[in-house]
Image: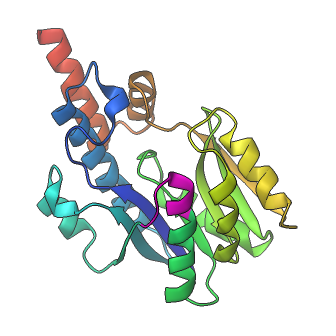
Amino acid sequence: MTVLLVMAKAPVPGTVKTRLCPPATPEQAARIASAALLDTAEAVQGTTALTPVLACAGRLRAGVAGEALVAAFAGWRVLPQRGAGLGDRLANAHADVATAFPGRAVLQIGMDTPQLSPDLLDAAARRLDDASAVLGAAADGGWWALGLRDPRHATVLRAVPMSTPDTGRRTHAALESRGLTVASLPVLRDADEWPDALAVAAAAPGGRFAREVAAVRATLVSG
């Protein structure tokens, strides 16, 4: 059974979704982040044959809607993120899952794509039946999902510059340099900046994320 690894950060105001400010306030941005994480957890819970694991930076209870987040991730294996940069934290999280679940494939996502559906996640995991790696490109040049039949190969991420317009291309090349066959997943948009948040909310209008984005828009109109 494939492990579905979610990389997340406790939604504490001033530390998450800072690129949404302005127009959002730090508190509103944290609410949007919390909503995105709750929507992501719900999508993962709806999958059919995946073992959920959360690698978290910070304490969920310390963030906005902390009690709701703790309840949403009850029953999950929760691991602390380790490392200084994002590449190190990603590689360490994959290594920790490899230790906790020997021989399991890993599909890793973040908390910036609340438009994900259980069907999309199940389909992404199934791609690992035919490829040694899968990569879901993001519209901004990054990536939203990485699947590895052997998660120890994620060590290549330590040398890949993250959060750049060519992070996706460099990740793909790094995986191929280890002899991996990399299959592509659908391109999605990360909710990093305000135009992205509007687009993602429109793609999933019934979710918590969309409601929090709408709340910010309402304050802009009323102000």
Q: Quadrant of residue 200?
A: top left
Q: Is residue 89 magenta?
A: yes
Q: Quadrant of residue 79?
A: bottom left
Q: Which residue is pictured at 12% across the width and 62% down the height?
A: 67
Q: Residue furthest bottom?
A: 102
The spot of residue 134 in percent (x, y) is 71, 60
Magenta span of residues: 82-90
The spot of residue 28 in percent (x, y) is 19, 33
In the shown orientation, is residue 111 left or right of residue 216? right
Foreground residue, 184 or 173? 173
Question: Quick check: 220 above or below 100?
Answer: above
Q: Which residue is pictured at 67% across the width and 50% down the height?
A: 160
Quarter of the image where the N terminus is located: bottom right
In the shown orientation, is residue 64 left or right of residue 126? left
Foreground residue, 101 or 217? 101
Q: Quadrant of residue 153?
A: bottom right
Foreground residue, 154 or 194? 154
Q: Is residue 202 visible?
A: yes
In the shown orientation, is residue 107 left or right of residue 22? right
Foreground residue, 14 or 51? 14
